[in-house]
Image (tube, rainbow, N blue to C red):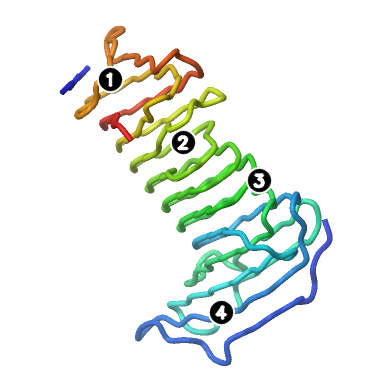
Amino acid sequence: MTKLRPGQLVTGLVFCIPLLAPVSCSLFRISREEVQRHPAEPGMGLLVDNACGDVTIGTWDHKEIEVMVVRTSWGGADEFDRIVLNIESGEPFRIETSFLEADVRASVDLHLRVPMGMSVERVTSYNGDIVLAGTVGDAQLESTNGDVTITGHRGLISASTTNGNITMIGDNEGFLVLDTTHGLVTTELVESPTVDGRIKVSNGGALIYLGENVNADLRLRVSNGELRTEGTDIDVRHLMGTRFEVVLGDSGAIVDIVATNGDIQLASR
């Protein structure tokens, strides 16, 4: 055990299924759902900007994008009229939500199914989570007060969040940046990275699972935390101060891992 311390605007619905009435979620909350479908092609880009709520993106074998919109209000049904949904069909395909006023007591969750091969380019969410599953594209993901979860993604990920966790597990291609404040980053290197990457954690921690045949150069810095390698035979080289290095296999791409006020744990996969 090693333990070291230092653009066309769509004006009508192609397909819409509103509920007949709002669904009461509690004594004070009501929700309303609708589903829209719009033509889309594999290879098109996708941009999503959600003002307040979750964004979930998966894929299906259809040449159209399905958008399920779930509006939830804790201020009465009139709050729904203060939410704006804008969808622009074109290249790239754009989905955006906004509020007419600053004090709207409502949220909007977006659940998307996109054609296989549609490229996710950018997703932003405020006070909500971002989930990608089986998608493609060099994607930039930004959340505030929410988690970011990526699985089965083909393309390089740049993800950041505040007050949330980043989890990137399960047959993903790779990442450029994983950055969180007040959260945990959990990811894996089961194949040798093809480009340099960076993991940065402030007031949180990082857990990285390592495959047996990975070639990479891990450069680590831990401030007010520990570097942990329990249950592994990893050879850690202490450079100076709070800086360490781990050479995996025959070395390779550089992965910088920085933790401030938190631990870094390296584990075997």
- Outermost residue on the right side: it is 8
| Residue receiving disc 4 | 33
- Mark 1 or mark 4, which is nearer to you? 1
Binning the other alpha carbons within 10 Å of mark 2 as few (below 14), some (14 to 19) or many (20 upward) gives many
| Label disc, if present, on residue 178 of the rendered structure | 2
Please tell me whether residue 167 is drawn above or below residue 234 in the rendered image.
below
The span from disc 2 to disc 1 (Cα, nearest Å) is 23 Å
Asked if residue 253 can be seen in this view, the reply is: yes
Tag on residue 234? 1
Q: Pointer 3: what residue?
A: 121
Whether tag 2 and tag 1 are in contact, CB under 8 A, the answer is no
Callout 2 amino acid: Leu
Q: Which badge, 4 or 2, comes first in the chain's sequence?
A: 4
- Amino acid under label 1? Ile
- Left-right relation of 99 to 268: right
Asked whether the residues under the numbered discs 3 and 2 touch, taking CB atoms below 8 Å apart as contact, a structural biologist would say no
